[in-house]
Image (spheres, grey):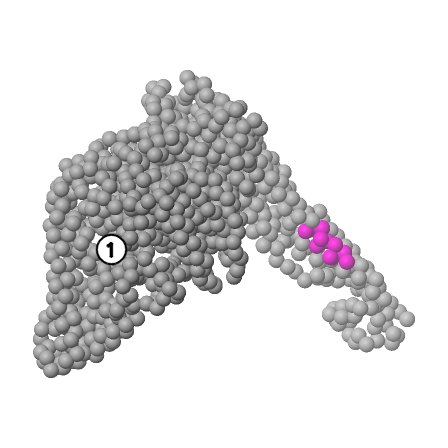
């Protein structure tokens, strides 16, 4: 093999970040080369093509929910195919996938990944044995790893903060694994699968996939919530793992979670996901609506008759919604409240939330639970209530009381929700999400010289006061400023042409029109009889115009000389080129000891 | 004044309540899952499996009509089998579904046979789908095309996983990018003698073949 | 038959307003400005944070500001030149549309 492509963790992180920008093919390749140069100091040479799943010739791929870009690099003596995968296309998919993942099911995204890689190979006309490397973040790691384990889609998989594989998921997805589990543990129904001690199944899976795991390379943040939850039953972490502490202020959630039973975590998670997503999208109202299925905001401020009227008008839909949403919600809330001291207590201890946030949340979750139980009781009696309602001879007072009780419970839930929200705990917990992101990972990959802001590479000069220079931006400037100046040059000549056209030529045109008119007058004077009457030569019937002579005078056009201005504009372009070089020199001076800065500038122009 | 309001309120509740009751009755009667007599077979006794079955009438002896939850394919469902609920999935927009069928573990222990169906509506290339099936079994499979009707193609491969386990892998596809990747395996129970095992396996294979031919895509035009 | 000649100044072609040309020409200036803006966006991203100090940084910042100012004054000059040129164009075209002419006619009654 010739010079093999170098893969560093920060290169991975930046490539993955790039993938989320959904660039077009040319732009993607350009950025890919730029990042490669910055990260390795080397120019990625050879023929490079990219292909996005959205552009797939099979519309089926783009509809599968899979999203990724294939990059094929042919350096002449070596060929490699890189697949950069996104987690999931949209929120719906993301939610679905994360829930499915915890339930240990759904591998259709892994199937789609394999299909896309297969298609990319055909598209680039590469042989079956070209090395395929997958880059993935988050859920895409699950997809890529499953694709590697089940379909040999990849030769290597590199991931950051990946969603781990799940051996229950694999039992159903990988028949080979299933058959070996069945034989090894002598099970004869899928029910028995859940009776195998999880640790045994875990160990068996680790051993079964041991060989393939050698091709999996993961970088994981200790603070990544996804890493924390992968302690629950079913998950197994494959491959070589590099742990990074991306948020030194907190210890990470994994150890906290390790003490909490699986089903409690699952309930907490589902509750938190529904809660957070709905609140994110539509505030408190939507949050509550998602949880209990009722738009409490529509009546929470009403009282007495007005409130009763509203409830009556919406009674049917409300009861339906409650019937559907309440039982699972109550289940989850009860699991969480039963363990709330443990969950919120350890969150507080670890510094994720404040004491007040803990107390208010626990208090109001208990209140929500009480209201939910009361609603459940009301609904249990509801059948009876309805029977009564159908009978006009039975007393009415009770029903009104019941309806108002229902309403007041709903309002209570709403208010409690609002109180929890007010503490800022949701925002606080949301910041945990940052530890799942690529940018926090990149930020942690700093050394004395190099660091990152967003996905840009920053150099810090240590000569005197530290000075931060965005090297990505500097190289971009150096690379793109010349084309921009050239574009400006073109615009200056366009302007020059426009002056000629709008003034000189236009003036000539006007002159020509006048001249035409003169010629016309002189050649057919008789058509200009109106001149006689116009100038008072009456009567006109006995007169005939014999000739017209125009004594034309045309002065040359004045004030049309832009030479001075054009000269200035052109000078500005020229001085721009000097300015760029000066800027480059200034940056090189800041980083005198770093030899490669100068080389980076040189190479950046060859991208 | 207050009394009048309450009377009006009650009348309103009667009307609305009445409506609600009607709706409820309607929805109850349309569900096949309520208070009815079911055939005493595993497929109906298992509540989850029952939810896929269209009717209590057999389509042929021992089979009931099954419609997938994504509403993308149907088949004759064997009465002795049940569907694993934990692993069942329907993807957003009905773009995929996974079914895991096995014989009722309460029933005969002669045979352990699992049939899995992976449906997707984003099939790209037939060869790739066959490769995926082969890879999942870690075997080199040779597929034969069996039938071609209604724009639907069935391709089959017999496999011997090892001395114990054999089975049939199948790919059913059509020109609308729909595909079903099916793996049906057969394993004799521990108590089964090796000589009877072979004949049991042969019989099961025949059943699988018969079953495969009942699987059909449901054409949903304009999706 | 006798012929007579008279001389008059005549509007040969109706007048027209060419002020629109200002807009036409200014578009080109706007286009150049857009390139400059793009250029400065690239440049401005390089130094991280506004408050960084240092000899080299100060020098570059000064250079950038001077350059921007110079470009701005060129554009201002170009814009006023455009205005002047088009106004003048308007007047001059109006001028050439009026010409002096001698008309000779024959009087048949005499």
Taking the spot 29% from the left edge, 65% from the top edge, the residue there is B39
Q: Is residue A277 above or below residue A217?
A: below
Q: Where is residue C6 in the image (x, y as percent from the top left)?
A: 79, 64
- The outermost residue toward the top is A593
Residue in the image at 64% along x and 59% along y: C16
The percent coordinates of residue A15 (x first, y second) are 42, 35
Most prominent secondary structure in the magenta stretch?
Answer: helix
Determine the secondary structure under disc 1. Answer: helix
Q: Mark 1 points at which residue?
A: A287
Position above or below: B18 against A108:
below
Question: Which residue is nearer to you in this view: C91 or A287?
Answer: A287
- Examine the rendering and report whether any part of residue A39 can be seen: yes
Q: What stretch is highlighted in magenta?
A: A506-516
Q: Can residue C74 be seen in this view?
A: no
- Which residue is nearer to you in this view: B110 or A245? B110
Q: Is B96 in the magenta?
A: no
């Amino acid at each position: 093999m010739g010079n093999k492509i170098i893969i560093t963790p920060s290169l991975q992180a930046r490539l993955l970040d790039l993938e989320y920008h959904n660039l077009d093919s040319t732009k993607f390749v350009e950025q890919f080369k730029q990042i490669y140069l910055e990260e390795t100091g080397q120019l990625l040479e050879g023929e490079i093509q990219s292909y996005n799943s959205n552009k797939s010739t099979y519309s089926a791929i783009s509809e599968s929910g899979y999203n990724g870009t294939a990059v094929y690099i042919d350096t002449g003596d070596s060929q490699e195919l890189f697949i950069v995968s996104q987690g999931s296309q949209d929120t719906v998919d993301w939610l679905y996938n994360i829930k499915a993942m915890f339930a240990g099911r759904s591998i259709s995204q892994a199937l789609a990944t394999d299909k896309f890689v297969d298609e990319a190979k055909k598209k680039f006309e590469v042989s079956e044995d070209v090395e395929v490397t997958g880059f993935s973040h988050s859920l895409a790691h699950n997809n890529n790893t499953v694709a590697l384990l089940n379909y040999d889609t990849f030769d290597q998989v590199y991931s950051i903060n990946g969603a781990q594989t799940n051996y229950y998921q694999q039992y159903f997805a990988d028949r080979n694994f299933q058959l070996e589990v069945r034989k090894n543990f002598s099970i004869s129904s899928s029910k028995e699968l859940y009776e195998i001690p999880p640790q045994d199944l875990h160990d068996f899976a680790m051993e079964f996939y041991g060989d393939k795991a050698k091709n999996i390379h993961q970088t994981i943040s200790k603070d990544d919530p996804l890493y924390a939850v992968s302690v629950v039953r079913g998950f197994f972490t494959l491959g070589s793992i590099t742990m990074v502490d991306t948020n030194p202020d907190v210890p990470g959630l994994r150890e906290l979670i390790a003490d909490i039973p699986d089903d409690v975590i699952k309930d907490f998670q589902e509750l938190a996901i529904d809660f957070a997503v709905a609140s994110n999208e539509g505030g408190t109202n939507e949050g509550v609506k998602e949880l209990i299925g009722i738009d409490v905001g529509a009546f929470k401020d009403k009282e007495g008759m007005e409130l009763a009227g509203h409830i009556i008008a919406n009674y049917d839909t409300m009861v339906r919604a409650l019937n559907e949403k309440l039982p699972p919600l109550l289940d989850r809330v009860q699991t969480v409240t039963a363990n709330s001291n443990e969950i919120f207590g350890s969150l507080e201890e670890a510094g994720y939330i404040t004491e007040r946030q803990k107390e208010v949340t626990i208090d109001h979750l208990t209140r929500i639970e009480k209201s939910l139980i009361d609603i459940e009781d009301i609904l249990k009696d509801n059948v009876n209530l309805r029977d009564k309602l159908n009978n006009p001879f039975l007393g009415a007072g009770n029903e009104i009381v019941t309806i108002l009780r229902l309403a007041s419970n709903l309002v209570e839930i709403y208010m409690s929700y609002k109180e929890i929200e007010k503490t800022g705990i949701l925002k606080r917990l949301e910041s945990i999400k940052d530890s799942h992101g690529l940018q926090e990972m990149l930020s942690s990959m700093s050394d004395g010289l190099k660091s990152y802001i967003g996905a840009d590479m920053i150099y810090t000069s240590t000569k005197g006061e530290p000075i931060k220079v965005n090297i990505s931006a500097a190289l971009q400037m150096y690379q793109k400023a010349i084309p921009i100046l050239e574009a400006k040059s073109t615009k200056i000549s366009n302007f020059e042409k426009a002056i000629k056209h709008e003034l000189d030529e236009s003036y000539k045109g006007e002159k020509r029109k006048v001249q035409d008119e003169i010629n016309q007058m002189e050649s057919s004077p008789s058509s200009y009889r109106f001149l006689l009457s116009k100038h008072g030569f009456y009567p006109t019937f006995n007169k005939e115009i014999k000739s017209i002579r125009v004594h034309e005078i045309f002065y040359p056009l004045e004030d049309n000389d832009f030479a001075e201005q054009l000269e200035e504009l052109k000078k500005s372009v020229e001085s721009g080129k000097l300015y760029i070089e000066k800027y480059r020199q200034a940056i090189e001076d800041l980083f005198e000891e770093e030899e490669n800065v100068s080389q980076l500038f040189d190479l950046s122009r060859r991208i | 004044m207050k009394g009048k309001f309450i009377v009006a309120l009650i009348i309103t509740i009667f009307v609305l309540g009445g409506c609600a009751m009607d709706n409820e009755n309607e929805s109850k009667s349309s569900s096949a899952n309520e208070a009815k007599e079911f055939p005493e077979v595993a497929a109906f006794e298992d509540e989850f499996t029952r939810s896929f079955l269209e009717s209590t009438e057999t389509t042929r002896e021992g089979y009931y009509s099954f419609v997938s939850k994504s509403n993308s394919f149907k088949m004759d469902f064997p009465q002795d089998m049940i569907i694993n609920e934990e692993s069942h999935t329907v993807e957003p927009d009905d773009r995929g579904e996974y079914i895991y069928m096995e014989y009722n573990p309460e029933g005969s222990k002669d045979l352990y046979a699992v049939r899995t169906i992976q449906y997707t509506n984003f099939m790209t290339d037939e060869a790739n789908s066959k490769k995926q099936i082969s890879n999942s079994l870690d075997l080199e499979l040779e597929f034969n095309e069996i039938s071609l009707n209604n724009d639907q193609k069935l391709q089959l491969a017999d496999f011997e996983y090892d001395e114990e386990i054999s089975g049939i892998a199948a790919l059913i596809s059509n020109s609308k990018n729909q595909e079903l990747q099916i793996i049906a395996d057969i394993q004799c129970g521990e108590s089964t003698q090796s000589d009877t095992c072979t004949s049991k396996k042969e019989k099961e294979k025949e059943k699988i073949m018969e079953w495969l031919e009942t699987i059909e895509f449901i054409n949903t035009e304009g999706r | 038959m006798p012929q007579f000649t008279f001389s008059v100044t005549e509007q040969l072609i109706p007048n027209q307003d060419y002020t629109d040309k200002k807009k036409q020409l200014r578009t080109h200036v706007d286009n150049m400005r857009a390139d400059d803006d793009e250029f400065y966006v690239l440049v401005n991203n390089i130094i991280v944070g506004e408050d960084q100090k240092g000899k080299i940084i100060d020098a570059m910042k000064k250079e950038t500001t001077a350059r921007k100012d110079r470009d701005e004054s060129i554009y201002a000059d170009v814009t006023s030149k455009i205005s002047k040129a088009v106004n003048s164009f308007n007047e001059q075209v109006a001028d050439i549309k009026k010409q002096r002419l001698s008309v000779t006619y024959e009087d048949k009654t005499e």
